[in-house]
Image (cartoon, rainbow, N blue to C red):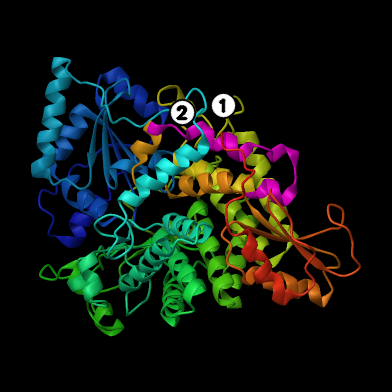
């Protein structure tokens, strides 16, 4: 149990109504003791899930959970559990459909009875609590039909190409045809890097000019999210802001700078620049890079998780949006700098590293590659567990000094999202450099993930290893993390040719390709969509065979790196599968065919163009 930080917020701001210095919510962690206590005392369970960089979470913490009437109700009738969605990505993913903060109510036996989305003030939160208390006393609590899905007992038998096409149609229905992006807001929070990669991939596969135009619009949309003073991208914008770039239509955007949004923005700009050479995208990458290096980079080169929205000395008469509209560094610093959350999460860093590699491949700027290498090396040096997997979070002097809403949990257990996102980053570095040590590290993490998290019977991967709470709320197979896992293991199987990885990707996709799971995930399906595309359209492998010290080997590798092919697997290869021709040559292959040996680097792009469509021999049933 911990003392709520909302209490300290009351003293600091002297403006939060309902603060009571004598008491606070009795928070518990997601541990067996909390669930057993709820059952023994016949109390409803409240699970408060969110992240440190969430402004709405902060408001609920500082106002609702500091209200004396709310505190009294919770401490008497509920067992209150707090969860940091990024430190515990298995739990965060489970409740991500409800956005942050997510407030989940469970019966004493841990059956979910209600999920509440977003911030609630005391006036509309207390009636919810009283209603649940009354229903519990009357024995009228009913299971919530929207409860998170559980792991399917058997794999999907539907043809994978059919599932792929249905998911394409689902994503397309929410496309913003005017501005790009998805949903009403279009940009930022609703436009993930995975969705962007998916639409660019489909435009490439089928020479689809309409898709290509929508992809570029989506990339351009991120330009209006950039903070012109400190750089970095805000979490969301709205279509109307397109008419007033730079002002954010008086900042109706969400003024949070989450690390995930920064990696999404770099991805958007890298893809836009690679397709157009338009310098506006180059400027966009530079602005995100400026913010990350000046504000979000730890001493070892890894990245913190977010910058919060509100400065410490914001006057009561000034809104948060007005603060961010201040046009100079000096004017902002008068009111202080919004706090940085100094937690470093491995999965989020994997996403940033992957985005920086894309920026290097698109621009040729070696500084972006150096940034990616430095962060990856730091994680390998400090977070590689003796069993071969990587740790999600660690304590540090910086994070210990943060005033957090929720305690930073640093469980030394394998989380699927950390393994597959960092593994993806390592494979991206291997693709960009040809350096074998990145592949070797990815291979080690792949084998450790199979050993720790794979469901060998049905296929797919659990979010984490079972613990004492798993007997009450079973660990599940998250759709998006399994999508990332499928892509990671697919690429790993082609790079290594190791039989241990054979069919892992297809089994992983089938293990979670259930219509109800896809429907429940809503907009969070980009990684799974990309995995479906990969297993149904196949790889394009660029292999340079011969003496790697020969100048032509490096020239061929650079030529392959310059080719935009989203399914590209680029590497050096020892003679064996292909003959030693006495000097380096490149072969481009998919499951259908291979090119003739390529000696001239200037012909690589033209040869690769013949492979841009789906392979016809891929089995998808």
Judge from the rendering whether residue 436 lies leftward or rightward of residue 33; answer left or right.
Answer: right
Q: Quadrant of residue 412?
A: top right
Q: Position of residue 119 (x, y in %)?
A: 20, 48
Labelled pair 2, 1 in contact (Cβ < 8 Å): yes
Viewer can see residue 114: yes
Q: Position of residue 302 (x, y in %)?
A: 53, 63
What is the chief secondary structure element of the magenta stretch? helix
The residue located at (38%, 30%) in the rendering is 149
Span colored in magenta: 491-515
Residue to which mark 1 is pinned: 458
Judge from the rendering whether residue 14 lies leftward or rightward of residue 386; answer left or right.
Answer: left
Judge from the rendering whether residue 607 lies leftward or rightward of residue 77; answer left or right.
Answer: right
Q: Indicate which disc, 2 or 1, sits on the residue closer to the N terminus.
A: 2
Q: Quadrant of residue 28?
A: top left
Q: Position of residue 621 (x, y in %)?
A: 56, 33
Q: Is residue 232 above or below residue 520?
A: below
The residue located at (26%, 76%) in the rendering is 245
Q: Is residue 94 above or below residue 561?
A: above
Q: Secondary structure at mark 1?
A: loop
Residue to which mark 2 is pinned: 151
Q: Residue furthest top?
A: 139
Residue 66 in the magenta stretch? The answer is: no
Q: Position of residue 405 (x, y in %)?
A: 31, 51
């Amino acid at each position: 149990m911990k003392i709520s930080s909302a209490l300290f917020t009351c003293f600091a701001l002297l403006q939060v109504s309902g603060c009571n210095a004598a008491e606070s919510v009795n928070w518990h962690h997601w541990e067996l003791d909390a669930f057993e206590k709820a059952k023994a005392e016949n109390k409803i369970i409240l699970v408060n899930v969110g992240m440190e960089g969430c402004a709405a979470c902060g408001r609920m913490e500082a106002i609702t959970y500091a209200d004396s009437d709310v505190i009294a109700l919770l401490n008497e009738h509920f067992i209150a559990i707090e969860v940091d969605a990024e430190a515990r990505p298995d739990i965060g993913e489970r409740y991500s459909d409800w956005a942050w903060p997510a407030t989940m109510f469970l019966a004493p036996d841990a059956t979910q009875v209600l999920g509440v989305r977003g911030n609630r003030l005391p006036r509309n939160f207390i009636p919810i609590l009283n209603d649940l208390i009354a229903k519990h006393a009357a024995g009228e609590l009913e299971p919530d039909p929207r409860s998170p899905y559980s792991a399917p007992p058997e794999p999907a038998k539907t043809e994978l190409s059919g599932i792929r096409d249905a998911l394409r149609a689902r994503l397309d229905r929410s496309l913003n045809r005017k501005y790009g992006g998805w949903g009403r807001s279009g940009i930022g929070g609703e436009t993930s890097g995975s969705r962007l990669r998916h639409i660019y991939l489909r435009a490439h596969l089928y020479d689809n000019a309409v898709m290509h135009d929508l992809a570029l619009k989506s990339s351009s949309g991120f330009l209006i999210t950039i903070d012109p003073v400190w750089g970095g991208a805000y979490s969301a914008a709205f279509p109307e802001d397109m008419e007033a770039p730079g002002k954010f239509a008086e900042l109706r955007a969400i003024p949070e700078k989450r690390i995930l949004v920064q990696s999404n923005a770099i991805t958007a700009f890298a893809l836009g620049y690679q397709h157009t050479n338009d310098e506006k995208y180059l400027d966009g990458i530079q602005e995100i890079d400026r913010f990350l290096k000046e504000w979000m980079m730890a001493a070892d080169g890894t990245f913190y998780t977010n910058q919060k929205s509100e400065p410490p000395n914001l006057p009561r008469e000034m809104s948060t949006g007005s603060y961010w509209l201040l046009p100079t560094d000096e004017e902002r610093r008068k009111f202080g700098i919004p706090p940085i959350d100094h937690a470093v999460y491995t999965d989020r860093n994997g996403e940033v590293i992957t985005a920086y590699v894309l920026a290097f491949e698109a621009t040729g700027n070696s500084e972006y590659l150096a940034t990616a290498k430095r962060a990856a090396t730091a994680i390998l040096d400090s977070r590689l567990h003796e069993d071969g997997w990587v740790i999600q979070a660690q304590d540090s002097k910086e994070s210990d000094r943060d005033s957090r809403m929720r305690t930073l949990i640093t469980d030394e257990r394998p989380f699927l999202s950390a393994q597959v996102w960092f593994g993806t980053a390592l494979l991206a570095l291997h693709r960009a450099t040809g350096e074998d040590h990145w592949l070797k590290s990815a291979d080690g993490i792949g084998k450790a993930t199979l050993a720790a998290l794979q469901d060998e019977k049905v296929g797919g991967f659990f979010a984490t290893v079972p613990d004492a709470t798993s007997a009450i709320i079973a660990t599940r197979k998250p759709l998006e993390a399994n999508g990332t896992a499928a892509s990671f293991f697919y690429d790993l199987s082609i790079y290594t040719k190791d039989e241990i990885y054979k069919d892992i990707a297809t089994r992983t996709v089938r293990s979670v390709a259930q219509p109800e799971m896809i429907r429940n995930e809503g907009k969070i399906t980009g990684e799974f969509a990309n995995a479906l595309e990969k297993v149904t359209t196949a790889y394009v492998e660029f292999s340079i065979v011969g003496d790697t010290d020969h100048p032509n080997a490096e020239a061929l590798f650079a030529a392959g790196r310059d080719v935009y092919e989203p399914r590209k697997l680029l590497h050096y290869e020892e003679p064996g599968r292909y003959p030693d021709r006495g000097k380096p040559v490149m072969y481009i292959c998919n499951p259908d065919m291979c090119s003739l040996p390529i000696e001239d680097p200037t012909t690589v792009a033209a040869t690769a163009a013949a492979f841009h469509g789906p392979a016809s021999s891929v089995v998808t049933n």
